[in-house]
Amino acid sequence: MKNIMAGHGTPHARIEIVPLIDIMFFLLASFMLVSLTMSKQQTIKVDLPSAVAARQDFKPEIINLAVDRSGSYFLEKQRITLPDLQKELTRRIQANTNLPVYISGDLDTTHGAMVGLLDLVRGSGFQRVAFNVKAGAAGK
C-alpha cells in the first residue's frame, strides 16, 4: 500500500504514435492506388467542353487551327487541305521551334478529325499544343 500511495504502483497510460503513423501511411498509399484504378473508360459521344476563363486569341506568334463539323480544316480562318497544312506547319516550325498551336473544334466535330489534326501537328514537331474552348460556364 505504501508503493501505491507514493505513486510507484499506478500504471501510466501511453499512446504509441509510431504505429499510428505507419497505419496512416499504409491507408494513404492504399487509397491513392485504389483511386488511380477507378477511372472509367467510356466510349460515348461527348460535347467539347467550355471554360469560364477562355478567350479568343489570333496573334502572329500563335498558330490557330480549327476543324468544323464537316471535317474541314482551317488555318487562321482560311480553309486548307491536310497536305498544304502539313507543308505550312513544317515551314513555321523551321522558322520558330517554340510556337504554340491552338486547336479549336466545332461542338459537332468528330473525335477522329480532332485526333487526326493533333497527330499531324505533333508529327510536324510542335510540342506546345492546346485545345481552345468557348467562353461560358464550365460543365454545360
Image (spheres, rainbow, N blue to C red):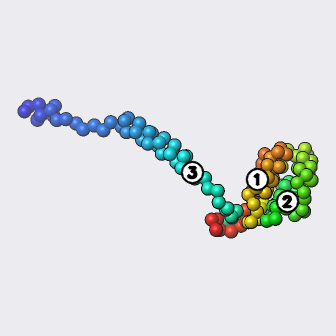
> Tag 3 or tag 1, which sits nearer the N-term?
3
- Are discs 2 and 1 less than 8 Å apart at CB? no
Q: Position of residue 114 (x, y in %)?
A: 77, 56
Q: Calculate the distance from the C-alpha at mark 2 to the C-alpha at mark 1.
A: 12 Å
Q: Which amino acid does the dot numbered 3 rest on?
A: Ser
Q: Calculate the distance from the C-alpha at mark 1 to the C-alpha at mark 3.
A: 21 Å
Q: Which residue is mark 3?
A: 39
In the picture, the quarter occupied by the C terminus is bottom right
SS class, disc 2: strand
Q: Position of residue 72 (x, y in %)?
A: 85, 62
Q: Residues within 10 Å of mark 1 (few under 14, many from 20)?
A: few
Q: Which residue is mark 1?
A: 115
> Tag 3 or tag 2, which sits nearer the N-term?
3
- Residue visible at 91% across and 52% down? 83
Q: Which residue is mark 2?
A: 73
Q: Calculate the distance from the C-alpha at mark 2 to the C-alpha at mark 3.
A: 32 Å
- Residue visible at 24% across and 38% down? 13
